[in-house]
């Protein structure tokens, strides 16, 4: 039986093979190429697939490079006898005559098969029409040029070829594989690093899982070794190299181990380190042996290894003395300060407090620039070579703090047990609290951060620590949507340190949002204008542009918001600002939604979601996936909408920044299907929140109109009136145009429900006027849709049709097919023909009124009376009245009979 480890991460490949087999069983012969790099488990995957189908006749063969020139070698294996044929076509006829129906042919290492056999097999596929024949060739995804050309020529004459690509394993796959193989639950950071080191190759991963002791997997490791098999192969190659080639390769390996170096090294620097004046022959030999690859860009030649494992294997071949001397020399050659320091660390076999101090100072400069990832690497390295125990602990804690700032939460999590073993203290608690915020653990963060602040008797005596804790409490207040607290802690950070200090810059960047949350919009705008130009340079500007973009979105300036947020999305430093980038992407997606650029918004969501998975920054999950769920629901892509909804979930104990978008996500999806009772239920946690400042502030969270609208449609008109009044007053006080428009359409529904249609029209028209010059197509569509429904219910069908047509055009331009269909139903209910009436034949249509026809359509599709009422903006009693009349006209007595009649008429 196949080891189940080979199936981990292979569900999609197996599903694809099953689909192709099902198709071949219908009499469509298929040739399938199973491709992938060496070690990806292609052969094991196909073997498992074969074992699952014992009902098939299976013929298997494999190519061998020494038999590639032996005619019919593969075909002889398949038939179990010699082949006598003059050409491939004759061999194909003989082959088909020998194999039965329901047959699977598997050729492993097909790139080593003789060309005549492959031609005969290809001809067999071309002549097997009507037979159940599935042929699988297993081969690498990269072939030598001559083999690749021959294969391409062969396949070009096949009527059809399908490809199943067996790719690398993902970090979650690796976590599952490690648990299955050695019973170790790898941290997300370790799984990610193992994936990067092995390029996700299953064979290499399994070898390392077997070779590295189990107790080492939960410890921090500077780098992974190469698997022994790979190391042995590299060692044998190095032994054959000339001294100059070996020196060149070793120099590339040494330069690549510095933490701030890229995966490629310039040829000039490598030659200088290797002490070679002419690298031509050495480079040619290294390239020929597969040790190095070369790339030239703008006249600069750079060198790299084909994979990280080869780099590790070469590094392990270098003896300790030469290793130290090469790094010492490299430190004198490189220009980058960080690279120089890390080379000195590698050149120093023991602890070194002077070097640790230099790394500490370098980390502070990186942090000042917002390059948190570099700061983290420097601090963690400094902690490892610190001689003083207290300094070693402090630097490790600060390193984890920097990792959290860089959004590298998986790596930060690996140090948590070490930090928790340290006695409670303000810095320790501040770091753990900071990590808890990013993970979305509100209560834990609150306890740790408030305790950390209480441990400082005199903030002026420890200003850096006081500012750091204050900045963490700024972020905590932001996640709690507490504007007043946010401003308080931002000011405390500013009181402790100069304006250019990193904790102060981050606090001031967020402070304006706290002001806006409490209605002080002018102060918020002025606070950003007052920030010094020096802070707006470098990586720190990203924080400010993100916050200004967020603020612009809340102030009905989505075009400006898009500009600022797009500028804040890219990461200038190596992961240093990924955390800020994710905030920017979350709000950029909302901005693109507001502007009607929904496809752009979905692409932004997809990018951010992938980064959230990698960083495990759970705090922003609901905010990102809210947009994905809403757009997909409006476009009728329900599988995708449900996936985003699932990933956006949050509970009452989570941060309000998580709970509010999670509730909106569910409520907006429910509204799309006219489930207004669920809209009210999903929004109830927001209604019940005690701290309401930022929740109710106009422009921040679009929930009041959603809730008020659901109250009206479920018949709770007086309750809707009472709920709406304070929100209308606040929107008017703030002069917030889109908020007034959104609340206005609810007020129009209330007036319409009370029979005052003239007042309702005035409100709807005023709402449309409020947003007439704003680039908000979705809001404009919602107002028109509610307006049209209200007019139709009041019997103003001609006017209603015109307004609903406008809503339909807007929804159609957005791709909101669910609301386009609702508009069509409204138009039909009003008696307007849309040219798409296929539900019932014309003879039966003539017996139903437009309203009866609309009700009948929805009931026949499976909707309840309550759902139909919500969809058509009618009372349940009215729906029941129309349904009774439909039953009478059709001579039926039940909903099932109505559905059956519609199905019968559709077939007719």
Image (cartoon, grey):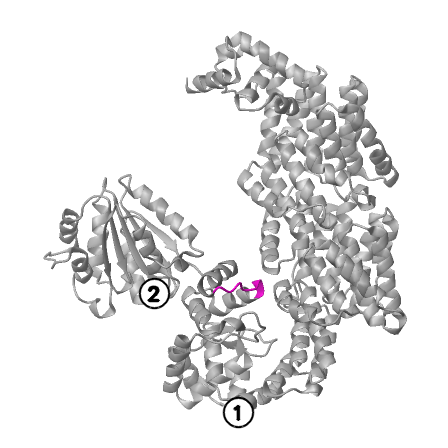
Q: Name the residue under label 2.
A: 143
The span picked out in magenta is 183-189
Residue 43 in picture, x, y percent from top left: 33, 60
- Residue 321: mark: 1
The residue closer to the viewer here, 162 or 191, is: 191
Placement of the N terminus among the 4 image quadrants: bottom left
The answer to whether 657 appears left or right of 384 in the picture is right
Q: Which of the 4 quarters of the picture holds residue 423?
A: bottom right
Number of numbered discs visible in the structure rendering: 2
Q: Identify whether 816 is placed above or below 375.
A: above
Disc 2, SS? loop
Figure quadrant of the C terminus: top left
Q: How crowded is mark 1: few (under 14 residues within 10 Å), some or many (20 or more)?
A: few
The residue mark sitting in front, 2 or 1, is: 1
Question: Is 50 placed above or below 279 here?
Answer: above
At 40% from the left edge and 48% from the top edge, which residue is drawn? 15
């Amino acid at each position: 039986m196949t080891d189940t480890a080979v199936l981990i991460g292979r569900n999609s490949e197996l599903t694809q093979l099953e689909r192709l087999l099902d198709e071949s069983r219908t009499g469509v012969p298929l040739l399938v190429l199973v491709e992938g790099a060496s070690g990806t488990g292609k052969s094991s995957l196909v073997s498992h697939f074969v074992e699952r189908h014992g009902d098939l006749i299976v013929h298997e063969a494999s190519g061998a490079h020494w038999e590639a020139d032996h005619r019919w070698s593969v075909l002889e294996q398949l038939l179990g006898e010699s082949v006598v044929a003059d050409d491939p076509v004759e061999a194909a006829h003989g082959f088909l005559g020998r194999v039965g129906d329901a047959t699977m042919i598997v050729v492993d290492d097909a790139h080593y098969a003789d060309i005549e056999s492959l031609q005969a097999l290809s001809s067999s596929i071309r002549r097997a029409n009507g037979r159940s024949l599935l042929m699988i060739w297993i081969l690498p995804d990269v072939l030598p040029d001559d083999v690749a050309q021959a294969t391409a020529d062969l396949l070009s004459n096949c009527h059809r070829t399908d490809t199943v690509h067996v790719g690398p394993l993902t970090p979650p796959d690796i976590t599952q594989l490690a648990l299955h193989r050695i019973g170790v639950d790898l941290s997300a950071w370790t799984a990610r690093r193992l994936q990067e080191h092995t390029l996700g190759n299953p064979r290499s991963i399994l070898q390392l899982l077997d070779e590295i002791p189990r107790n080492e997997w939960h410890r921090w490791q500077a780098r992974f070794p190469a698997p022994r098999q790979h190391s042995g192969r590299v060692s044998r190659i190095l032994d054959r190299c000339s001294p100059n080639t070996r020196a060149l390769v070793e120099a590339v390996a040494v330069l690549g181990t510095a933490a701030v170096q890229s995966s490629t090294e310039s040829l000039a620097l490598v030659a200088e380190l290797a002490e070679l004046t002419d690298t031509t022959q050495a480079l040619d030999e290294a390239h020929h042996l597969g040790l190095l690859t070369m790339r030239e860009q703008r006249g600069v030649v750079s060198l790299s290894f084909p994979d990280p494992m080869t780099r590790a294997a070469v590094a392990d071949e270098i003896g300790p003395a030469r290793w130290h001397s090469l790094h010492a020399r490299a430190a004198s050659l490189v220009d980058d300060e960080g690279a120089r320091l890390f080379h000195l660390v590698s050149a120093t076999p023991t602890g070194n407090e002077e070097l640790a101090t230099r790394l500490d100072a370098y980390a502070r400069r990186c942090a000042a620039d917002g390059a948190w990832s570099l700061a983290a690497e420097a601090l963690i390295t400094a902690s490892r070579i610190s001689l003083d125990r207290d300094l070693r602990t402090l630097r490790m804690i600060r390193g984890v703090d920097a990792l959290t700032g860089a959004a590298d939460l998986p790596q930060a999590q690996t140090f948590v047990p070490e930090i928790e073993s340290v006695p409670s203290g303000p810095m320790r608690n501040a770091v753990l609290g900071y990590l808890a915020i990013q993970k979305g653990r509100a209560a834990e963060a609150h306890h740790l951060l408030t305790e950390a602040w209480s441990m400082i008797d005199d903030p002026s005596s420890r200003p850096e620590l006081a500012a750091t804790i204050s900045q963490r409490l700024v972020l905590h207040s932001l996640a709690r949507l507490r504007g007043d607290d946010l401003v308080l802690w931002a000011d405390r950070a500013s009181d402790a340190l100069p304006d250019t200090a990193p904790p102060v810059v981050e606090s001031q960047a967020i402070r304006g949002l706290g002001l806006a949350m409490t209605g002080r919009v002018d102060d918020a705008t002025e606070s950003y204008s007052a920030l010094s130009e020096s802070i707006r340079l470098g990586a720190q500007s990203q924080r400010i542009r993100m916050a200004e973009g967020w603020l612009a979105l809340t102030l009905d300036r989505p075009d400006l918001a898009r500009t600022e947020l797009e500028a804040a999305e890219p990461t200038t430093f190596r992961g240093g600002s990924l955390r800020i980038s994710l905030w920017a992407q979350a709000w950029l997606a909302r901005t693109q939604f507001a502007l009607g650029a929904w496809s752009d918004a979905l692409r932004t969501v997809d990018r951010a979601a992938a980064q959230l998975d990698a960083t495990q920054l759970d705090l922003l999950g609901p905010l990102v996936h809210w947009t994905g769920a809403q757009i997909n629901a409006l476009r009728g892509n329900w599988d995708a909408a449900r996936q985003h909804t699932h990933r956006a979930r949050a509970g009452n104990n989570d941060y309000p920044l998580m709970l509010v978008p999670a509730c909106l996500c569910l409520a907006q999806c429910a509204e799309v299907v006219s489930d207004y009772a669920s809209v009210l239920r999903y929004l109830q946690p927001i209604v019940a929140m005690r701290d309401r400042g930022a929740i109710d502030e106009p422009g921040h969270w679009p929930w009041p109109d959603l809730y008020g609208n659901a109250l009206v449609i479920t018949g709770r008109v007086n309750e809707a009136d009472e709920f709406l009044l304070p929100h209308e007053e606040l929107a008017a006080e703030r002069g917030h145009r889109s908020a007034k428009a959104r609340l206005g359409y609810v007020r129009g529904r209330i007036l319409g429900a009370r029979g005052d249609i003239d007042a309702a029209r005035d409100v709807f028209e005023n709402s449309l006027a409020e947003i007439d010059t704003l680039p908000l197509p979705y809001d404009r569509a919602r107002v028109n849709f509610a307006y049209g429904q209200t007019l139709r219910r009041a019997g103003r069908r001609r006017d209603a049709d015109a307004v609903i047509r406008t809503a339909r055009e807007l929804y159609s331009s957005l791709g909101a097919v669910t609301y386009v269909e609702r508009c069509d139903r409204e138009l039909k209910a009003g008696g307007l023909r849309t040219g798409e009436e296929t539900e019932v034949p014309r003879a039966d249509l003539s017996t139903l009124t437009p309203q009866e026809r609309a009700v009948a359509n929805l009931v026949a599709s499976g909707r309840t009376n309550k759902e139909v009422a919500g969809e058509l903006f009618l009372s349940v009693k009215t729906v029941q009245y129309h349904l009774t009349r439909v039953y009478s006209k059709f001579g039926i007595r039940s909903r099932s009979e109505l559905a059956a009649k519609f199905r019968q008429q559709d077939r007719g």
